Each structure stands twice: as C-alpha cells, then as structure tokens.
Image (spheres, helix red, strand yellow):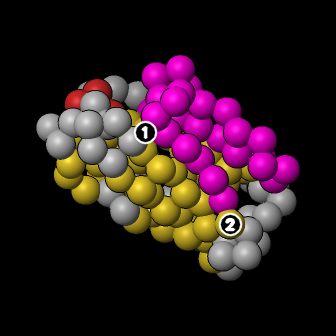
Amino acid sequence: HVQLVESGGGSVQAGGSLALSCAASRYSISSCGMRWYRQAPGKGREWVSSIGSDGTTTYAESVKGRFTISRDNAKNTLYLQMNSLKSEDTAVYYCMAACSRFYWGQGTQVTVS
C-alpha cells in the first residue's frame, strides 16, 4: 500500500506563495496518476490539479496560471507550487495517488489571509 505524507502548508498573506510536497513510501508512484485536492471549511472536497505518469498536467480553472503541479519520480514525491494565493485558496490540501487503487494523504492546512 502507498503511504502519502503532505507537508509545506502554513499561513501566508494574500499574494504570497507556498510549496506543498507529498512524499510517497512503501510503493513507487512512478506509474500512478497523482492529484491534489482541497477542502475548505464547510465545503466538499474539490479537485485542484492532476499529473499523469507521463507528466501531462491539468488544472481547475480556479487555480490555472497560479498553481503548478510537478513530480519527481526519483524522489517518489509530488509537488504543488502555489503562487498569487487568494483567501479563497484557504483549505486543507490533500494528495491522492491513483494506482491500482486510490490512496490519500492526511492533508496539510493552507491559510491565506
């Protein structure tokens, strides 16, 4: 089973940047599609971005042009660079690995004020 651990969350002022990481262990994620989701207080979980095993990326309209997803298969790690942050980006951010089944991390809090 894949274990995913997110890090890099925190508090930042609007317009600032944060870089999230999602470290995978127990299994290589190189053949897995990887995704970032987020969940704001009182709302459902929202898809943010995806990156395929071939490196193809897609983004939600709300973050396009501001967020960049990437992966380093040698480090078994997924990243999300978040720039020009807005208050509406405040949420718990989760990474997800779509392998033979789906695996979720525990989430990391991002607060934009």
Residue visible at 61% across and 67% down? 77
Upstream in sequence: badge 2 or badge 1: 1
Q: Is residue 33 left or right of residue 66?
A: right
Q: Which is closer to the viewer, label 2 or label 1?
A: 2
* Vertical order, 53 against 112 (above or below): below
| Label 1, residues with CA under 10 Å away: few <14, some 14-19, many ≥20 | many
Q: Amino acid at mark 1?
A: Arg
User: Dots 2 and 1: beta carbons under 8 Å?
Assistant: no
- Where, by quadrant of the figure, is residue 27 drawn? bottom right
**Image quadrant occupied by the C terminus:** top left
Residue 70 colored magenta?
yes
Q: Which amino acid, mark 2? A: Asp
Please provide percent x and percent y for residue 41: 25, 33
Residue 45 place in picture, x, y as percent: 45, 33
| Crowd rating for badge 2 (residues with CA inside 10 Å; few <14, some 14–19, many 20+) | few
Residue wearing tag 1: 38
The residue segment tinted magenta is 45-71
| Residue 65 in view in this figure | yes
Numbered tag placed on residue 23 in the rendering = none
Q: Residue at x 55, y 57 (%)?
A: 79
The answer to whether residue 27 shows anywhere in this view is no
User: Where 100 falls versus 77 (above or below)?
Assistant: above
Indicate the secondary structure of the residue bearing disc 1.
Answer: strand
- What SS does tag 2 mark? strand
Residue located at (55% from left, 70% from top): 23
Say which residue label 2 marks.
Answer: 72
